[in-house]
Amino acid sequence: MTGVVPALLCAVCYSLSYVLLHRGQADLDSDDNGLLPILVVGSLILGVATLVKMAHEADASLLSSPRAWMGYGLCALGGIVGTMLGRMSLYGAIRVLGATRGVVIATLETMVTLVLAALFLQESLDGERLAGVALIFASIGVLLWERQRHPQRALLTLGVSLGVAAALFKGSGHFLRKLGMNQGLDPTLAAALDVTAACLSYLAVLAASGRLSSYIRVYTRTFNVYLWSAGCLSAAGVLLFFVAAATSPLSTVAVMVGLEPVLVALFSIVLLRGLDRLTWWTALYAALATAGVMLAK
């Protein structure tokens, strides 16, 4: 299917962004976990891309029907649920557990997406996919067994809770994105609305809680190249997801994106030496998660 290649590239972009995020978190003195600059960079990049596309298209009627308005509204809602809430949870899990372990827990988003696609989009959920889901659970079980020997078990509980929350939010966000794209939307504008809605909502949350000015000072005082680079890759990942969702079933896209655990493990070996401690157990649960995702395709 035409959406497979964009979905695979989306997984690569997301995985690299998580690895760079975790590297940037090591130099970060903030409980924001790097979310603010990543959302700001993403909304700016995708906003500029949308303006350029509209300027060069003869029929720039991207909001020409009530159906399109509803679709873009669903994409914006998906941004608040999946991009803002999902990343708030996932980035916290990555900071607590590390990039590889945090992403393995969040692989449950594939199951959430498959169930929603089966219930509401009439996409199949057969025995093979259920076996894939079982392997995903097995990978998380191995991860939990490995981490039970960690002296700070309270951190394990927190990290797992954040990872599960991320899976629920991100899986629901994927579903809302697909509902929007089913209205025949422009992927670039849809992606821009997704990330911009997430960014504005997060800024509103920070302003309401009185933390916005302190976070702005943190991120303007020093330039964290890893976080800004993660923001660029994350924006590319969102756009590629929408491109894939425009041409392929949601279940196919979700499964391809679900290859993140093994990609994060590979990138971590190269980029996170000494920061994200990888073991043979890491290879095992990353491989189990990936095998589960491939069975579920």
Image (spheres, rainbow, N blue to C red):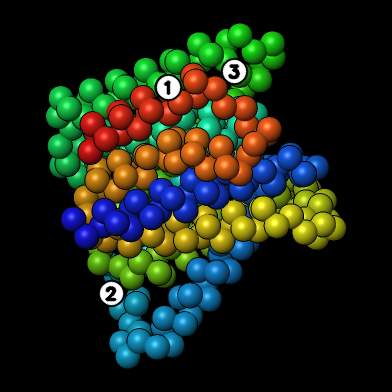
**Residue 237, position in %: x, y?**
45, 56
- Residue positioned 30% across, 29% down in the render: 291
The quarter of the rendered structure image containing the N terminus is bottom left
For badge 1, the amino acid type reads: Leu
**Residue 86, position in %: x, y?**
51, 42
The secondary structure type at the circle numbered 3 is helix
Location of residue 111 with respect to 51 vertically, above or below: above
Task: Give the residue at mark 3.
Answer: 157
What separation in Å lies between label 2 and label 1 (alpha carbons)? 50 Å
Viewer-nearest of discs 2 and 3: 3
Of callouts 2 and 1, the N-terminal one: 2
What separation in Å lies between label 2 and label 3 (alpha carbons)? 47 Å
Task: Give the residue at mark 1.
Answer: 284
Of callouts 2 and 3, the N-terminal one: 2
| Residue 124, visible in the rendered structure | yes
- Given contact means CB atoms under 8 Å apart, are the residues at marks 2 and 3 in contact? no
- Residue positioned 35% across, 76% down in the render: 63
Location of residue 78 with respect to 158 vertically, above or below: below
**Residue 162, which numbered label?**
none
Of callouts 3 and 1, the N-terminal one: 3
The quarter of the rendered structure image containing the C terminus is top left
The secondary structure type at the circle numbered 1 is helix
For badge 2, the amino acid type reads: Ser
Viewer-nearest of discs 2 and 1: 1
**Residue 189, position in %: x, y?**
41, 70
**Residue 65, which numbered label?**
2
What separation in Å lies between label 3 and label 1 (alpha carbons)? 21 Å
For badge 3, the amino acid type reads: Thr
**Residue 87, position in %: x, y?**
55, 44
- Given contact means CB atoms under 8 Å apart, are the residues at marks 2 and 1 in contact? no
- Residue positioned 59% across, 54% down in the render: 230
